[in-house]
Amino acid sequence: MKHPVILFLFIVFGSLTLPAQTGNNEQELVDLLYGKRIKEAIEYYDKHKDNLLHPFTVDSYKLFTDIYLNKSDSVFLQLPLFMEKYYGSVFDDDLVFFLPSLYFDAGDYVNGLKMVEILESFFLKRNEKIEKMLEELTRLKNSYPISQLEIHNDSTTEDVHIPVKTEPLLLFEAKYNGSPLQTVFDTGSSLPFLTDKKNADKAGIKIKEAYGMNMMNGVERSSANGWIDSIRIGSLLIKNVPVFVFEQELMKEFTPDSILMDKEKKAKADSIFDQMQIIMGMPVIQMLNHIQFNFPKNEMVISLNRKDPENENNNMYVESNYLYLKSTINDIDFSAFFDTGANLGKTAVVLTNQFYQVHKDKFPTLSPDENESLPKLCSEGEVSSSPTLTKPASFILSINGNRMDLHKEAIIIDPDSDSYSIPFSFQKEGFLTLEFMKKFRNVTFDFHNMMFDGDTNE
Protein backbone atom coordinates (compact mmCIF):
# COMPACT_ATOMS: atom_id res chain seq x y z
CA MET A 1 0.00 0.00 0.00
CA LYS A 2 1.15 3.52 -0.62
CA HIS A 3 2.04 5.72 2.32
CA PRO A 4 2.86 9.36 2.90
CA VAL A 5 6.49 9.61 1.93
CA ILE A 6 7.20 13.30 2.43
CA LEU A 7 5.92 15.68 5.07
CA PHE A 8 7.81 18.89 5.53
CA LEU A 9 8.98 17.65 8.92
CA PHE A 10 9.71 14.11 7.73
CA ILE A 11 12.13 14.73 4.87
CA VAL A 12 13.43 11.67 3.02
CA PHE A 13 17.03 12.03 1.88
CA GLY A 14 18.44 9.56 -0.59
CA SER A 15 21.81 11.27 -0.38
CA LEU A 16 23.14 14.70 0.49
CA THR A 17 25.82 15.24 -2.14
CA LEU A 18 29.09 16.81 -1.04
CA PRO A 19 31.39 18.71 -3.41
CA ALA A 20 33.10 16.47 -5.98
CA GLN A 21 36.55 16.85 -4.47
CA THR A 22 35.60 15.07 -1.24
CA GLY A 23 36.35 11.36 -0.92
CA ASN A 24 34.06 8.35 -0.74
CA ASN A 25 34.55 8.11 3.03
CA GLU A 26 33.15 11.62 3.44
CA GLN A 27 30.11 10.86 1.28
CA GLU A 28 29.39 7.54 2.97
CA LEU A 29 29.45 9.13 6.42
CA VAL A 30 27.17 11.97 5.28
CA ASP A 31 24.77 9.42 3.78
CA LEU A 32 24.64 7.58 7.11
CA LEU A 33 24.10 10.77 9.11
CA TYR A 34 21.38 12.20 6.91
CA GLY A 35 19.79 8.76 6.60
CA LYS A 36 19.37 8.88 10.42
CA ARG A 37 21.64 5.85 10.80
CA ILE A 38 23.58 7.50 13.63
CA LYS A 39 24.74 4.35 15.41
CA GLU A 40 26.28 3.09 12.17
CA ALA A 41 27.75 6.54 11.52
CA ILE A 42 29.56 6.42 14.88
CA GLU A 43 31.02 3.00 14.04
CA TYR A 44 32.00 4.19 10.56
CA TYR A 45 33.66 7.34 11.92
CA ASP A 46 35.73 5.32 14.38
CA LYS A 47 37.10 3.23 11.48
CA HIS A 48 37.75 6.07 9.01
CA LYS A 49 38.25 9.23 11.08
CA ASP A 50 41.76 9.85 9.68
CA ASN A 51 40.22 10.25 6.21
CA LEU A 52 37.31 12.47 7.31
CA LEU A 53 38.46 16.06 6.98
CA HIS A 54 35.72 18.04 5.20
CA PRO A 55 34.39 20.68 7.68
CA PHE A 56 30.72 19.99 6.86
CA THR A 57 31.20 16.26 7.44
CA VAL A 58 32.98 16.79 10.77
CA ASP A 59 30.53 19.43 12.01
CA SER A 60 27.50 17.36 10.97
CA TYR A 61 28.95 14.32 12.73
CA LYS A 62 29.50 16.26 15.96
CA LEU A 63 26.00 17.80 15.90
CA PHE A 64 24.13 14.60 15.02
CA THR A 65 25.98 12.36 17.46
CA ASP A 66 25.43 14.81 20.30
CA ILE A 67 21.69 14.70 19.52
CA TYR A 68 21.85 10.88 19.48
CA LEU A 69 23.82 10.79 22.76
CA ASN A 70 21.42 13.27 24.39
CA LYS A 71 24.05 15.99 24.87
CA SER A 72 21.46 18.75 24.44
CA ASP A 73 23.55 21.57 25.96
CA SER A 74 26.28 20.92 23.41
CA VAL A 75 23.75 20.67 20.58
CA PHE A 76 22.21 24.06 21.30
CA LEU A 77 25.62 25.72 21.45
CA GLN A 78 26.57 24.24 18.08
CA LEU A 79 23.30 24.82 16.22
CA PRO A 80 23.45 28.62 15.61
CA LEU A 81 27.06 28.37 14.41
CA PHE A 82 26.19 25.42 12.19
CA MET A 83 23.34 27.36 10.56
CA GLU A 84 25.43 30.50 10.04
CA LYS A 85 28.22 28.48 8.48
CA TYR A 86 26.25 26.21 6.13
CA TYR A 87 22.75 27.56 5.48
CA GLY A 88 22.36 28.60 1.85
CA SER A 89 25.32 26.53 0.65
CA VAL A 90 25.41 22.85 1.62
CA PHE A 91 22.50 23.27 4.01
CA ASP A 92 19.11 24.25 2.54
CA ASP A 93 15.50 24.76 3.63
CA ASP A 94 14.57 21.07 3.64
CA LEU A 95 17.41 20.24 5.99
CA VAL A 96 16.18 22.89 8.44
CA PHE A 97 13.21 20.63 9.13
CA PHE A 98 15.29 17.48 9.12
CA LEU A 99 17.16 18.43 12.31
CA PRO A 100 14.14 18.67 14.66
CA SER A 101 12.88 15.35 13.27
CA LEU A 102 15.83 13.65 15.02
CA TYR A 103 14.30 14.69 18.36
CA PHE A 104 10.74 14.16 17.16
CA ASP A 105 11.39 10.53 16.20
CA ALA A 106 12.86 9.86 19.65
CA GLY A 107 9.82 11.36 21.41
CA ASP A 108 11.98 14.13 22.91
CA TYR A 109 9.56 16.99 22.30
CA VAL A 110 11.06 19.41 24.85
CA ASN A 111 14.44 19.49 23.10
CA GLY A 112 12.75 19.31 19.70
CA LEU A 113 10.78 22.46 20.45
CA LYS A 114 13.88 24.20 21.75
CA MET A 115 15.67 23.38 18.50
CA VAL A 116 12.74 24.79 16.48
CA GLU A 117 12.87 28.01 18.52
CA ILE A 118 16.62 28.39 17.80
CA LEU A 119 15.95 27.86 14.09
CA GLU A 120 13.13 30.39 14.28
CA SER A 121 15.40 32.99 15.86
CA PHE A 122 17.98 32.36 13.12
CA PHE A 123 15.46 33.23 10.39
CA LEU A 124 14.13 36.25 12.27
CA LYS A 125 17.59 37.78 11.82
CA ARG A 126 17.53 37.25 8.05
CA ASN A 127 15.73 39.18 5.34
CA GLU A 128 15.14 36.30 2.92
CA LYS A 129 12.26 33.79 2.94
CA ILE A 130 11.32 34.90 6.44
CA GLU A 131 7.54 34.77 6.08
CA LYS A 132 7.40 31.33 4.44
CA MET A 133 9.99 29.81 6.75
CA LEU A 134 8.44 31.20 9.93
CA GLU A 135 5.03 29.91 8.83
CA GLU A 136 6.44 26.41 8.33
CA LEU A 137 8.33 26.52 11.62
CA THR A 138 5.10 27.53 13.40
CA ARG A 139 3.36 24.53 11.85
CA LEU A 140 6.26 22.36 12.97
CA LYS A 141 5.84 23.58 16.56
CA ASN A 142 2.13 22.79 16.35
CA SER A 143 2.92 19.19 15.47
CA TYR A 144 4.57 18.51 18.83
CA PRO A 145 2.51 16.94 21.66
CA ILE A 146 2.33 18.87 24.91
CA SER A 147 4.44 16.35 26.89
CA GLN A 148 7.28 13.91 26.34
CA LEU A 149 6.49 10.50 24.86
CA GLU A 150 6.49 7.77 27.50
CA ILE A 151 6.40 4.01 27.13
CA HIS A 152 6.43 1.37 29.85
CA ASN A 153 5.18 -2.10 30.73
CA ASP A 154 2.68 -2.28 33.61
CA SER A 155 3.15 -6.04 33.98
CA THR A 156 5.74 -7.80 36.16
CA THR A 157 6.52 -10.12 33.24
CA GLU A 158 8.87 -8.98 30.48
CA ASP A 159 7.00 -10.38 27.48
CA VAL A 160 3.72 -8.82 26.33
CA HIS A 161 1.59 -11.23 24.27
CA ILE A 162 -0.83 -9.70 21.74
CA PRO A 163 -3.17 -11.56 19.34
CA VAL A 164 -2.59 -10.69 15.66
CA LYS A 165 -4.19 -11.31 12.28
CA THR A 166 -2.29 -11.55 9.00
CA GLU A 167 -5.12 -10.70 6.59
CA PRO A 168 -5.55 -8.36 4.86
CA LEU A 169 -2.46 -6.96 6.61
CA LEU A 170 -0.64 -7.50 9.90
CA LEU A 171 -3.26 -6.35 12.41
CA PHE A 172 -3.67 -6.16 16.17
CA GLU A 173 -6.09 -4.37 18.47
CA ALA A 174 -4.94 -1.55 20.73
CA LYS A 175 -6.87 0.96 22.80
CA TYR A 176 -6.43 4.64 21.96
CA ASN A 177 -7.61 6.81 24.84
CA GLY A 178 -9.60 3.72 25.88
CA SER A 179 -11.22 3.15 22.46
CA PRO A 180 -10.28 -0.05 20.59
CA LEU A 181 -8.94 0.40 17.04
CA GLN A 182 -7.61 -2.21 14.64
CA THR A 183 -3.96 -1.28 14.13
CA VAL A 184 -1.74 -2.00 11.13
CA PHE A 185 1.86 -2.95 11.98
CA ASP A 186 3.52 -1.13 9.11
CA THR A 187 7.29 -0.86 8.63
CA GLY A 188 6.52 0.98 5.38
CA SER A 189 5.18 4.07 7.13
CA SER A 190 7.63 6.77 8.24
CA LEU A 191 5.13 8.38 10.63
CA PRO A 192 4.50 7.38 14.28
CA PHE A 193 0.75 6.95 13.67
CA LEU A 194 -1.59 7.68 10.81
CA THR A 195 -5.39 7.66 10.90
CA ASP A 196 -8.48 9.52 9.67
CA LYS A 197 -10.94 11.98 11.20
CA LYS A 198 -13.63 9.34 11.75
CA ASN A 199 -11.37 7.14 13.88
CA ALA A 200 -9.68 10.13 15.52
CA ASP A 201 -13.09 11.37 16.67
CA LYS A 202 -13.98 7.87 17.88
CA ALA A 203 -10.85 7.71 20.04
CA GLY A 204 -10.95 11.31 21.26
CA ILE A 205 -7.67 12.12 19.53
CA LYS A 206 -6.84 15.80 19.87
CA ILE A 207 -6.30 17.77 16.67
CA LYS A 208 -3.80 20.61 17.11
CA GLU A 209 -4.75 22.69 14.07
CA ALA A 210 -7.40 23.21 11.40
CA TYR A 211 -7.43 20.69 8.56
CA GLY A 212 -5.51 22.04 5.59
CA MET A 213 -4.12 20.87 2.27
CA ASN A 214 -0.71 19.24 2.52
CA MET A 215 1.33 17.61 -0.22
CA MET A 216 1.50 13.83 0.25
CA ASN A 217 3.04 11.58 -2.41
CA GLY A 218 2.64 14.32 -4.96
CA VAL A 219 -1.07 14.86 -4.18
CA GLU A 220 -2.60 17.54 -1.97
CA ARG A 221 -4.68 15.97 0.80
CA SER A 222 -6.68 17.55 3.62
CA SER A 223 -4.94 16.62 6.87
CA ALA A 224 -3.83 17.85 10.28
CA ASN A 225 -1.44 17.05 13.13
CA GLY A 226 -2.81 15.61 16.36
CA TRP A 227 -1.72 13.66 19.39
CA ILE A 228 -2.90 10.64 21.35
CA ASP A 229 -2.93 10.88 25.14
CA SER A 230 -2.58 7.14 25.73
CA ILE A 231 -2.24 3.90 23.80
CA ARG A 232 -2.74 0.56 25.53
CA ILE A 233 -1.22 -2.52 23.83
CA GLY A 234 -1.81 -5.32 26.31
CA SER A 235 0.14 -4.30 29.41
CA LEU A 236 2.15 -1.70 27.47
CA LEU A 237 1.21 1.93 27.94
CA ILE A 238 2.42 4.60 25.50
CA LYS A 239 1.62 8.23 26.33
CA ASN A 240 1.73 11.49 24.36
CA VAL A 241 2.15 10.23 20.82
CA PRO A 242 1.90 12.34 17.64
CA VAL A 243 -0.51 11.23 14.92
CA PHE A 244 -1.16 12.47 11.41
CA VAL A 245 -4.88 12.63 10.60
CA PHE A 246 -6.57 12.67 7.20
CA GLU A 247 -9.89 14.44 6.97
CA GLN A 248 -11.25 11.82 4.55
CA GLU A 249 -11.39 8.08 5.23
CA LEU A 250 -7.87 6.73 5.68
CA MET A 251 -7.70 4.03 3.04
CA LYS A 252 -9.67 5.97 0.44
CA GLU A 253 -6.74 8.36 0.32
CA PHE A 254 -4.68 5.54 -1.22
CA THR A 255 -7.33 3.83 -3.36
CA PRO A 256 -7.55 4.53 -7.10
CA ASP A 257 -10.73 6.12 -8.46
CA SER A 258 -11.27 3.11 -10.73
CA ILE A 259 -11.97 1.02 -7.63
CA LEU A 260 -14.01 3.63 -5.79
CA MET A 261 -16.28 4.09 -8.81
CA ASP A 262 -16.94 0.36 -9.27
CA LYS A 263 -19.67 -0.75 -6.83
CA GLU A 264 -18.51 -4.36 -6.60
CA LYS A 265 -14.84 -3.48 -6.16
CA LYS A 266 -15.69 -0.69 -3.72
CA ALA A 267 -17.80 -3.01 -1.54
CA LYS A 268 -14.94 -5.52 -1.39
CA ALA A 269 -12.43 -2.77 -0.64
CA ASP A 270 -14.64 -1.29 2.10
CA SER A 271 -14.91 -4.68 3.84
CA ILE A 272 -11.11 -4.83 3.94
CA PHE A 273 -10.52 -1.20 4.84
CA ASP A 274 -12.96 -1.27 7.75
CA GLN A 275 -10.45 -3.54 9.51
CA MET A 276 -7.61 -1.04 9.12
CA GLN A 277 -8.39 1.91 11.37
CA ILE A 278 -4.99 3.28 12.34
CA ILE A 279 -1.42 2.66 11.14
CA MET A 280 1.57 2.32 13.46
CA GLY A 281 4.81 3.26 11.70
CA MET A 282 8.54 2.91 12.19
CA PRO A 283 9.24 5.65 14.78
CA VAL A 284 7.07 3.79 17.32
CA ILE A 285 7.82 0.26 16.11
CA GLN A 286 11.53 0.86 16.85
CA MET A 287 10.70 1.96 20.39
CA LEU A 288 9.16 -1.46 21.10
CA ASN A 289 12.74 -2.81 20.97
CA HIS A 290 12.21 -6.56 20.53
CA ILE A 291 9.20 -7.88 18.60
CA GLN A 292 8.45 -11.51 17.75
CA PHE A 293 5.65 -12.83 15.57
CA ASN A 294 4.53 -16.44 16.01
CA PHE A 295 2.28 -17.07 13.03
CA PRO A 296 1.02 -20.58 13.98
CA LYS A 297 -0.19 -19.04 17.27
CA ASN A 298 -1.31 -15.75 15.64
CA GLU A 299 0.63 -13.87 18.29
CA MET A 300 2.94 -10.88 18.64
CA VAL A 301 5.33 -10.77 21.62
CA ILE A 302 6.86 -7.43 22.62
CA SER A 303 9.82 -7.14 25.02
CA LEU A 304 10.72 -3.54 25.85
CA ASN A 305 13.92 -4.25 27.74
CA ARG A 306 15.19 -7.49 26.23
CA LYS A 307 18.82 -7.29 25.12
CA ASP A 308 19.96 -10.33 23.15
CA PRO A 309 23.74 -10.92 22.96
CA GLU A 310 25.54 -8.50 20.63
CA ASN A 311 25.64 -9.67 17.03
CA GLU A 312 28.05 -7.90 14.70
CA ASN A 313 26.44 -9.43 11.60
CA ASN A 314 23.38 -7.21 11.71
CA ASN A 315 21.12 -7.52 8.69
CA MET A 316 18.59 -4.78 9.38
CA TYR A 317 18.86 -1.00 9.28
CA VAL A 318 16.58 2.00 9.41
CA GLU A 319 17.15 4.91 7.05
CA SER A 320 14.97 8.04 7.19
CA ASN A 321 12.35 6.09 9.15
CA TYR A 322 12.17 3.25 6.63
CA LEU A 323 13.21 -0.34 7.34
CA TYR A 324 15.69 -2.22 5.13
CA LEU A 325 16.94 -5.81 5.17
CA LYS A 326 20.29 -7.02 3.89
CA SER A 327 20.28 -10.45 2.24
CA THR A 328 21.52 -12.22 -0.88
CA ILE A 329 19.64 -13.36 -3.97
CA ASN A 330 21.32 -16.03 -6.08
CA ASP A 331 24.43 -15.19 -4.01
CA ILE A 332 24.31 -11.47 -4.92
CA ASP A 333 24.12 -8.89 -2.13
CA PHE A 334 20.59 -7.52 -2.00
CA SER A 335 19.41 -4.59 0.15
CA ALA A 336 15.64 -4.10 0.12
CA PHE A 337 12.99 -1.85 1.57
CA PHE A 338 10.83 -4.03 3.86
CA ASP A 339 7.18 -2.99 3.92
CA THR A 340 4.94 -5.10 6.16
CA GLY A 341 2.11 -2.82 5.03
CA ALA A 342 2.39 -4.04 1.43
CA ASN A 343 -0.01 -6.82 0.46
CA LEU A 344 0.55 -7.77 -3.19
CA GLY A 345 -1.17 -11.15 -3.05
CA LYS A 346 1.39 -13.91 -3.50
CA THR A 347 4.21 -11.53 -4.45
CA ALA A 348 6.89 -11.64 -1.76
CA VAL A 349 9.80 -9.84 -3.44
CA VAL A 350 10.01 -7.17 -6.11
CA LEU A 351 13.31 -6.43 -7.89
CA THR A 352 13.91 -3.12 -9.57
CA ASN A 353 14.70 -3.33 -13.25
CA GLN A 354 17.96 -1.44 -12.62
CA PHE A 355 19.19 -4.11 -10.19
CA TYR A 356 18.09 -6.85 -12.57
CA GLN A 357 19.92 -5.32 -15.55
CA VAL A 358 23.20 -5.10 -13.60
CA HIS A 359 22.98 -8.77 -12.55
CA LYS A 360 21.02 -10.14 -15.48
CA ASP A 361 23.29 -13.14 -15.96
CA LYS A 362 22.33 -14.35 -12.47
CA PHE A 363 18.58 -14.21 -13.15
CA PRO A 364 17.32 -16.52 -15.89
CA THR A 365 13.72 -15.57 -16.61
CA LEU A 366 10.60 -17.34 -17.76
CA SER A 367 9.72 -17.44 -21.44
CA PRO A 368 7.51 -14.67 -22.92
CA ASP A 369 4.61 -17.13 -23.13
CA GLU A 370 4.83 -17.87 -19.41
CA ASN A 371 5.13 -14.17 -18.59
CA GLU A 372 1.93 -13.42 -20.49
CA SER A 373 -0.06 -15.13 -17.74
CA LEU A 374 1.23 -12.75 -15.06
CA PRO A 375 -1.10 -10.21 -13.47
CA LYS A 376 -0.18 -6.64 -14.40
CA LEU A 377 0.15 -4.65 -11.18
CA CYS A 378 -0.31 -0.93 -10.76
CA SER A 379 0.10 1.15 -7.62
CA GLU A 380 -2.52 -0.58 -5.46
CA GLY A 381 -2.52 -4.03 -7.06
CA GLU A 382 -5.10 -3.15 -9.69
CA VAL A 383 -4.97 -4.87 -13.09
CA SER A 384 -3.18 -2.86 -15.75
CA SER A 385 -2.58 -3.43 -19.44
CA SER A 386 1.08 -2.43 -19.22
CA PRO A 387 3.26 -5.58 -19.61
CA THR A 388 6.09 -4.52 -17.31
CA LEU A 389 6.50 -7.58 -15.05
CA THR A 390 8.96 -10.41 -15.55
CA LYS A 391 9.26 -13.63 -13.54
CA PRO A 392 12.70 -15.02 -12.64
CA ALA A 393 13.17 -18.76 -13.21
CA SER A 394 15.74 -18.96 -10.40
CA PHE A 395 15.50 -16.92 -7.21
CA ILE A 396 17.16 -18.16 -4.02
CA LEU A 397 16.96 -15.57 -1.24
CA SER A 398 19.22 -16.12 1.76
CA ILE A 399 18.93 -14.19 5.01
CA ASN A 400 20.61 -15.07 8.29
CA GLY A 401 21.15 -18.69 7.24
CA ASN A 402 17.66 -19.21 5.84
CA ARG A 403 17.60 -20.11 2.12
CA MET A 404 14.25 -19.76 0.37
CA ASP A 405 13.30 -20.54 -3.21
CA LEU A 406 11.01 -17.62 -4.07
CA HIS A 407 10.93 -17.78 -7.88
CA LYS A 408 7.16 -18.27 -7.77
CA GLU A 409 6.67 -15.24 -5.52
CA ALA A 410 9.20 -12.82 -7.08
CA ILE A 411 8.81 -10.32 -9.89
CA ILE A 412 11.11 -7.95 -11.74
CA ILE A 413 9.59 -4.58 -12.50
CA ASP A 414 10.56 -1.51 -14.48
CA PRO A 415 10.65 1.42 -12.00
CA ASP A 416 10.39 3.91 -14.87
CA SER A 417 7.01 2.57 -15.95
CA ASP A 418 3.64 3.69 -14.62
CA SER A 419 2.74 0.17 -13.56
CA TYR A 420 3.86 0.55 -9.95
CA SER A 421 4.02 3.99 -8.44
CA ILE A 422 5.53 3.50 -4.98
CA PRO A 423 8.57 5.79 -5.16
CA PHE A 424 11.70 3.79 -5.92
CA SER A 425 13.99 6.43 -4.43
CA PHE A 426 13.96 4.65 -1.07
CA GLN A 427 13.67 1.05 -2.22
CA LYS A 428 17.35 0.26 -2.93
CA GLU A 429 17.52 -2.87 -5.13
CA GLY A 430 13.88 -3.77 -4.51
CA PHE A 431 11.37 -4.34 -1.75
CA LEU A 432 9.91 -7.10 0.40
CA THR A 433 6.23 -7.44 1.23
CA LEU A 434 4.07 -8.97 3.96
CA GLU A 435 4.01 -12.20 1.93
CA PHE A 436 7.79 -12.47 2.41
CA MET A 437 7.33 -12.21 6.17
CA LYS A 438 4.67 -14.94 6.07
CA LYS A 439 7.21 -17.33 4.56
CA PHE A 440 8.44 -17.76 8.15
CA ARG A 441 6.73 -19.63 10.98
CA ASN A 442 8.03 -16.98 13.32
CA VAL A 443 10.12 -13.85 12.94
CA THR A 444 12.01 -11.52 15.26
CA PHE A 445 12.71 -7.82 14.88
CA ASP A 446 15.56 -7.01 17.28
CA PHE A 447 16.11 -3.25 17.17
CA HIS A 448 18.83 -3.38 19.83
CA ASN A 449 21.08 -5.51 17.62
CA MET A 450 19.38 -4.52 14.34
CA MET A 451 18.74 -8.17 13.51
CA PHE A 452 15.90 -9.83 11.62
CA ASP A 453 15.63 -13.58 12.15
CA GLY A 454 13.11 -16.38 11.81
CA ASP A 455 12.33 -20.03 11.06
CA THR A 456 11.06 -20.69 7.57
CA ASN A 457 8.08 -22.82 6.62
CA GLU A 458 10.20 -24.79 4.17
Image: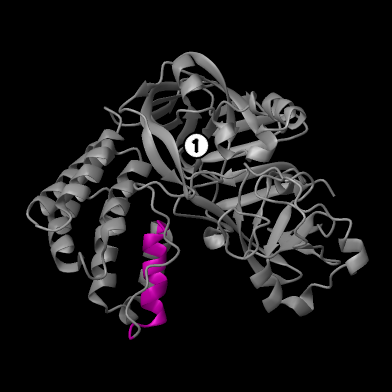
Q: Position of residue 210 (x, y in %)?
A: 32, 27
In the picture as drawn, the residue positioned furthest to the right comes out as 369
The residue wearing badge 1 is 288
Residue 355 figure quarter: bottom right
Is 190 on the left or on the right of 167, as rendered?
A: left
Question: Is 301 located above or below residue 406 in the figure?
Answer: above
Q: Position of residue 213 (x, y in %)?
A: 38, 38
Instruction: Tell me which residue sits at (66%, 33%) in the image.
Output: 260
For residue 28: magenta? yes
Question: Is 235 located above or below residue 303 in the figure?
Answer: above
In the picture as drawn, the residue positioned furthest to the front comes out as 261
Task: Between residue 254 and residue 54, name the one nearer to us.
Answer: 254
Question: Is 238 located above or below residue 432 in the figure?
Answer: above
Say whether residue 169 is visible. Answer: no
Residue 315 figure quarter: bottom right
Counting every numbered tag in the picture gives 1
Element on which disc 1 rests: loop
Q: Position of residue 294 (x, y in %)?
A: 71, 35
Q: Position of residue 258 (x, y in %)?
A: 68, 39
Task: Between residue 133 and residue 307, name the one nearer to us.
Answer: 133
Q: From which residue to which does the magenta span run?
A: 21-37
Residue 51 figure quarter: bottom left
Task: Between residue 66 and residue 242, name the one nearer to us.
Answer: 242
Is 254 on the left or on the right of 240, as rendered?
A: right
Instruction: Tell me which residue sits at (69%, 66%) in the image.
Output: 328
Bin the neighbour count of mark 1 within 10 Å (Cα to Cα): few under 14, some 14-19, many 20 and up.
many
